[in-house]
């Protein structure tokens, strides 16, 4: 199943609640929450108070992406604040397996993330432990970047590895995804699509409908 996960990093925070409702009304399935600490990535975004407020007002699946140092420190707080899935960077964790287990103990879905410079084989030991692998298709830390095409080769490789192990795992892509190139990510093997500025710039409802139409067309091929 192909899933769209709009990233609120590109939302207008003056109108965040209103825009989340627009996303929900337009039929997006997930909402992507990019948490940045200013250490693992240069930028600082938002944290627990924003997640709590969103959780209170929406039934959307909250897809939390921790771009933070030592994510294991924060798993409990984000789980309690309303995350449905917690995704963290394997480059940032002192013990990836233990962090996955901590997420599981909180009753949440678990995901791992790799940056553009990390080989896909780094995710291989954990494929049987997680619900999702997020392949960053830009350098993490800022929205509005252009997709790095070579990162789609990593998507292909991870999908191949999952098939070889007979594992059912979602593969998410995040960075530079637009209606015009979403088919490339889907063809590579991704099935969860993060889109930020391509959703929140302009007419949110129309943008989401365009994404879903293109994604459905690709699924029928």
Image (spheres, rainbow, N blue to C red):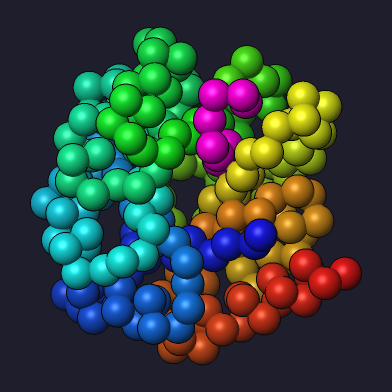
Q: Nearer the viewer, residue 141 or 129?
A: 129
Magenta part of the chain:
127-134
Q: Could you tell me which residue is drawn at 30 percent across and 47 percent down?
A: 83
Q: Quadrant of the N terminus?
A: bottom right
| In this rendering, position of residue 154 left or right of residue 142 | right
Residue 133 spot, x, y in % from top left:
57, 37
Residue 218 spot, x, y in % from top left:
79, 69
Any part of residue 176 in sight: no
Q: Could you tell me which residue is drawn at 46 percent across and 14 percent down?
A: 97
Q: Is residue 180 above or below residue 39?
A: below
The main secondary structure of the magenta stretch is loop
Q: Could you tell me which residue is drawn at 30 percent across and 79 percent down?
A: 21
Q: Nearer the viewer, residue 193 or 40?
A: 193
Any part of residue 70 in sight: yes
Q: Is residue 109 above or below residue 213?
A: above
Q: Nearer the viewer, residue 192 or 129?
A: 129
Residue 112 spot, x, y in % from top left:
50, 31
User: Is residue 79 covered in magenta?
Assistant: no
Total marks in image = 0
| In this rendering, position of residue 56 left or right of residue 136 | left
């Amino acid at each position: 199943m192909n899933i769209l996960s709009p990233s609120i990093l590109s939302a207008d925070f003056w109108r965040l609640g209103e825009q989340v409702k627009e996303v929900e009304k337009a039929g997006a399935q997930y909402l992507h929450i990019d948490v940045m600490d200013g250490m693992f990535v240069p930028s600082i975004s938002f944290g627990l108070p924003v997640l709590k407020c969103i959780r209170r007002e929406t039934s959307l699946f909250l897809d939390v992406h921790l771009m933070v140092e030592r994510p294991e420190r924060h798993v409990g707080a984000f789980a309690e604040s309303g995350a449905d899935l917690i995704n963290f960077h394997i480059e940032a964790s002192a013990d990836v397996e233990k962090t996955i287990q901590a997420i599981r103990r909180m009753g949440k879905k678990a995901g791992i993330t790799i940056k553009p410079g990390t080989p896909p084989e780094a995710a291989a030991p954990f494929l049987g432990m997680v619900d999702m692998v997020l392949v960053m298709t830009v350098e993490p830390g800022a929205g509005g970047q252009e997709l790095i095409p070579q990162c789609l080769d990593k998507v292909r490789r991870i999908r191949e590895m999952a098939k070889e192990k007979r594992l059912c795992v979602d593969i998410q892509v995040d960075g530079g995804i637009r209606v015009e190139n979403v088919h490339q990510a889907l063809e590579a093997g991704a099935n969860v699509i993060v889109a930020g500025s391509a959703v929140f710039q302009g007419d949110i409802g129309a943008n989401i409908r365009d994404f879903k139409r293109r994604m459905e067309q690709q699924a029928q091929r």
